[in-house]
Image (cartoon, rainbow, N blue to C red):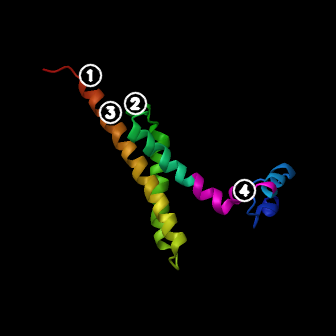
Amino acid sequence: MASILNKFVGNRVVFSNKFVLGLCEKFPKLAFLNDVTNLAPIMKWSLSIVPLSQMISGNKPADKIDLQQTASLFSTGTIWTYYATLIQPQNAGTRALAACNAAMAICHGSNLYRRYQFDKEKENQQQPSS
């Protein structure tokens, strides 16, 4: 099984077909995005920025929040924040990793709370008052 993955070990290029590599030569800024070292943190930050912008703008009401997805992203952010604090030696990269994952945990934790409050209010409205 490990021999199947050998061609991917140590390869930092995300897309290695001739068309994309040609574009990267023509437009050097695209080469920045075709490196996993740069693309992975960008994608990770998007997992925090998108829910934060939706909460601020009010585009995503609490009833549309997917509990399983939000709980898993909250857990992932929490676990990786803790893990990033254990990495030695500490440097700017490990602190950025911790900050990114803490932001993900905070955003999705607040979404979990919003959904919990929504479900609680909905449950209270359905109960007949005596």
Query: Are discs 2 and 3 less than 8 Å apart at CB?
Result: yes
Above or below for 61 versus 82: above
Q: Is residue 64 magenta?
A: no
| Residue visible at 48% across and 48% down in the picture | 49
Q: Secondary structure at mark 3?
A: helix
Q: Which residue is mark 1?
A: 126
Q: Amino acid at mark 3?
A: Phe
Instruction: Give the mark, 1 or 3, whose residue is nearer the N terminus.
Output: 3
N-term-proximal mark, 4 vs 3:
4
Span of residues in magenta: 26-43
Left or right of residue 69, residue 122 in this image: left
Q: Which mark is residue 48?
A: none
At which x and y percent is residue 103? 44, 55
- Residue annotated with mark 2: 63
User: On the image, numbered disc 3 is attached to which residue?
Assistant: 118
For badge 4, the amino acid type reads Asn
Type of the residue with mark 2: Asp
In percent of width and height, residue 117 lies at 30, 37
- Badge 2 local density, few (<14 within 10 Å), some, or many (20+)? some
- Image x and y of residue 91, in percent: 52, 76
Q: Earlier in the sequence, mark 2 or mark 3?
A: 2
